[in-house]
Image (cartoon, grey):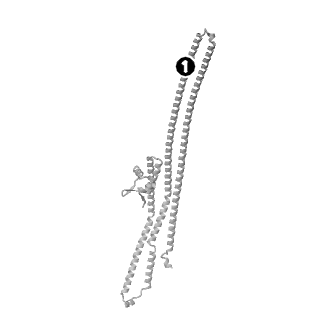
Amino acid sequence: MMETYTIKKVSDQLEVEKKTLKQWEKLLGSYLTIERVDGARVYTEEQIELFNDIKQLFDEQCTLDEVKEYVQLLIKEQEEQEHLVMESEAAVSKEDEPAQLKTAKKENVIDFQEHSNKQVKQEKKKTADKQENIPKNKQEKIPPIPEARLATEEEKQTISASIEEPKPNDLVVNEKELLQGELVEAVRRYEDVFEVLDTFKADLLKEMREGMRNEVREEIVGEVKRELEKSATQTVEMVESVGAYISESSERSARDVENMSKKIIRSNEKSFDEVTSLIEDYSTIAEEKTEDMRLFMKDVMENADESSKEMQYLLDRFSSNSTVAMNQVKFMVEKLNNSSTNTTEELRDLIDSMNEERVYYLKEMEKERKLHRQSVAEREEMFSDFVQTFRQTAAADMKRKRKWWKLFLS
């Protein structure tokens, strides 16, 4: 009898909710048939292993079509294995036909021997009853049974005993030994086929998982490229906006400088006109006012120097403001470059971690495969030891039994 499990045990074993199991059953309804007992779902060990594989595929973010293809391949492999097992059983049954005929003949001989023994016992009982009913004087008159007749009866008894020696249990044991030996030979014949199927299954699983991982990697790399392109476009837009702002500020500063220079020129022109008018007015009294005029000219020159200094100060201030703006732009560009380098480093770390996880998962798969092979080898050794010990004990029991024809020689 195959061991079955309820949906609760399966969910606890796989660490999956009942809803997800039912959802998987609906999605894969054309490939899976889960039996029900009294309205409750019943799962076999093979179905539990299949659901475990489905869980791993969904954890690796595989699509539903890929999962369906995987389940379909597994079902095909199981059908091929069942077909091979049926062929092996048919071959074994054909090989066992002569052995069955032999056992039937032996059973017929045993039945005949038992029937003859029963008849002999009944005759003995009848003779004993007759002897008891006959009176003593008549018993004395009865002639003695000849020795030859006694010898024949003893021979019959010895022959029946020798024929009775092969008991039906021994025959059943011998038949079981023959069947077990033939089954072992058939299993050994088909071991290579099963190994080839296992290797094909493992290679197919590896290829599917590698393809899924490559697709996931391509998707991740594409998303990363898109994010980098978006960040690059954003940086370009920021730089363009900053450049436009700087150009606008520089144009405004140039306009302000031009306006200030025009105002200064106008003020200088006005002051020069005033000076000329004063010179014309006071030309008559030039001698008296020469000193005053010189002082006044000195004041005008000093004012002109101060105005030129103010102009130089304003120009220096505007140039310093432009340099500060350029420095800010450079700082923003460097900051954006640093952020892009940080994102690339994070992506490299993520790819390295994914590679490490892949290596660890492959190592774990190799360990599990080695353990499975060791357990299979141990079971095969135990089964072969059991068969050898069983054969040795059967051979020892057969050697102990004496054959019927040796009784006459002894």
| Label 1 residue SS | helix
Which residue is more in the foreground, 18 or 148? 18
Q: Looking at the picture, which amino acid does disc 1 mark? A: Lys
| Residue 199 sits above or below residue 111 on the image | above
Q: Quadrant of residue 48?
A: bottom left
| Residue 292 sits above or below residue 70 on the image | above
Which residue is more in the foreground, 158 or 165? 165
Q: Residue at x 52, y 29 (%)?
A: 245
Q: Residue at x 49, y 41 (%)?
A: 223
Pinpoint residue 300: horizontal percent, then vertical percent.
60, 17
Pinpoint residue 130: horizontal percent, then vertical percent.
36, 85
Question: How many residues crowd around disc 1 within 10 Å: few (fewer than 14), some, or many (20 or more)?
Answer: few
Find the residue positioned furthest to the bottom: 137
Which residue is more in the foreground, 232 or 280? 280
| Residue 17 sits above or below residue 256 on the image | below
Q: Is residue 299 visible?
A: yes
| Residue 309 sits above or below residue 397 on the image | above
Circle 1 residue: 263
Pinpoint residue 213: horizontal percent, then vertical percent.
50, 46
Q: Is residue 77 visible?
A: no
Which residue is more in the foreground, 308 or 340? 308
